[in-house]
Amino acid sequence: TQAYLSGDLRRVMDAARSQYDAVPPSVQGWFEAELLERRNDRMLRKVEEILQNRRVLVAVGAMHLGGRTGLIDGLLRRGYRIRPLQPGL
């Protein structure tokens, strides 16, 4: 919670990944590829399609935000400005 509230996405990802440390490496690889990277790509394309017509609030699970294949980097690479909401707003 503290990592998320402070905006430290690396710590968020590390904490989330530690949840499945005991899972076999092949399952971890599948999870990363299918449920994060490919899903992020699909979500990114859909979000970009929606953004063509209007401004939106996008809410996703924390593991979809960070990293080179995360939604934040994907949108930034496409030239979008991203502004996080501050707690309490």
Image: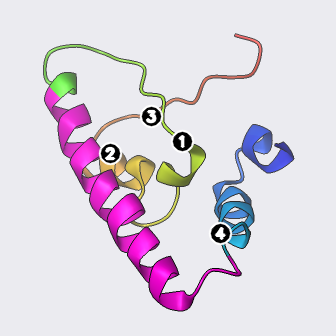
Gap in Å between the C-alphas at discs 1 and 4? Answer: 13 Å
Q: Which residue is mark 2?
A: 75
Q: Residue at x 58, y 46 (%)?
A: 62
Q: Is residue 11 above or below residue 84?
A: below
Secondary structure category for the residue under label 4: helix
Sort mark 2 into few (<14), some (14-19) or many (20+) by Cα contacts within 10 Å.
Answer: some
Where the C terminus falls, by quadrant? top right
Give the residues in magenta. 21-49
Q: Which residue is mark 1?
A: 61
Residue 10: mark in rendering: none
Which numbered disc flags the more N-terminal residue, 1 or 4?
A: 4
Gap in Å between the C-alphas at discs 3 and 2? Answer: 8 Å
Q: Which residue is mark 4?
A: 17
Q: Which residue is mark 3?
A: 82
Left or right: residue 3 compared with residue 23: right
In front here: 83 or 28? 28
Tell me the kind of residue under disc 2. Answer: Leu
Q: Residue at x 79, y 50 (%)?
A: 3
Tell me the kind of residue under disc 3. Answer: Ile
Labels 4, 3: front one = 4
